[in-house]
Amino acid sequence: MVYALWPRSETPAEASSDGPGLGQRAPSTAERRAADTPEALAPLRQNAGLAPCPTPSGNAAGPLAGITLECIGDGSSVDLGQALAGRPALLNIWAYWCGPCAEELPYLQQYAQRAGDSVAVLTVHNDANEANGLTRLTDYGVTLPGVQDGGGRVAAAVGAPNVLPVSVLISADGTVAKVLPQPFRSVDEIADAVRENLGVAS
């Protein structure tokens, strides 16, 4: 099987807002653009209708402990370590310009609906242009909860390679079970990866 992965280049280049680019845009050191104010994002958030981000459920552990990011759906702060504590999780690192991400995200939504409460599924938008991230999710019809991570803090914490998309499987104790730098092509493929690496049938 051949995978087409989109590099998070170290040489930033502006990507078109009209569609997925060529993977040449790197995450900024800023979490989001100055233009992405709460007022500017409010109508985009309303249109996207994303599910609420998880709330703190226990003591943080593992590489996500201490990482607090903005919930892309409502602008609230999310302590990832605490929010995911005590349950297996799948984090999907993506960006609005990433072609394979666009193909994969609907499968992740279908998987989340199938898995229910057994596995937390959270998207991580890895580009400073939060507005475009929200617009893309609306275009894809994806309403998964997600966080804004233009600075790439999650990718750095889990040791993800410099490509997109990347799925990170987190055990209930907060440790990283597996980093998968490849796009999923079906719901069953996601379920197989979760079962093999987290021991959860879904």
Image (tube, rainbow, N blue to C red):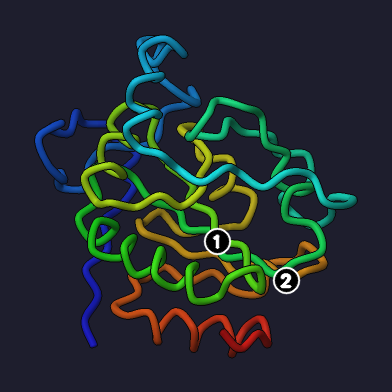
Where disc 2 sits, the SS reads loop
Q: Residue at x 46, y 32 (%)?
A: 150
Residue furthest out toward the right: 59
Q: Which quarter of the picture shows residue 198?
A: bottom right
| Quadrant into which the N terminus falls | bottom left
Q: Residue at x 46, y 52 (%)?
A: 144
Q: Which residue is mark 2?
A: 171
Query: Residue 64 shows which numbered tag?
Result: none
- Give the image location of residue 117, x and y in percent: 65, 68
- Occupied quadrant, residue 130: top left
User: Foreground: 144 or 176?
Assistant: 144
The location of residue 162, given as percent across then percent down, is 40, 54
Tell me which label, 2 or 1, sits earlier in the chain.
1
Q: Position of residue 61 (x, y in %)?
A: 84, 55
Q: Which mark is residue 121?
A: 1
- Between 157 and 95, which is closer to the camera in this rendering? 95
| Residue type, label 2 | Ser
In the image, residue 6 sits, relative to residue 34, either above or below, namely below
**Label 2 neighbourhood size at 10 Å, few (<14), some (14-19), many (20+)?**
many
- Disc 2 or disc 1, which is closer to the eye? 1
Place of residue 161 in the rendered image (x, y in percent of width and height, measured from the top left): 46, 59
Q: Residues within 10 Å of mark 1 (few under 14, many from 20)?
A: many
Q: Is residue 86 above or below residue 70?
A: below
Circle 2/circle 1 CB separation < 8 Å: no
Residue type at mark 1 is Val
Splitting the image into 4 quarters, where does residue 108 fall? bottom left
Horizontal relation, residue 133 to residue 111: left or right: left
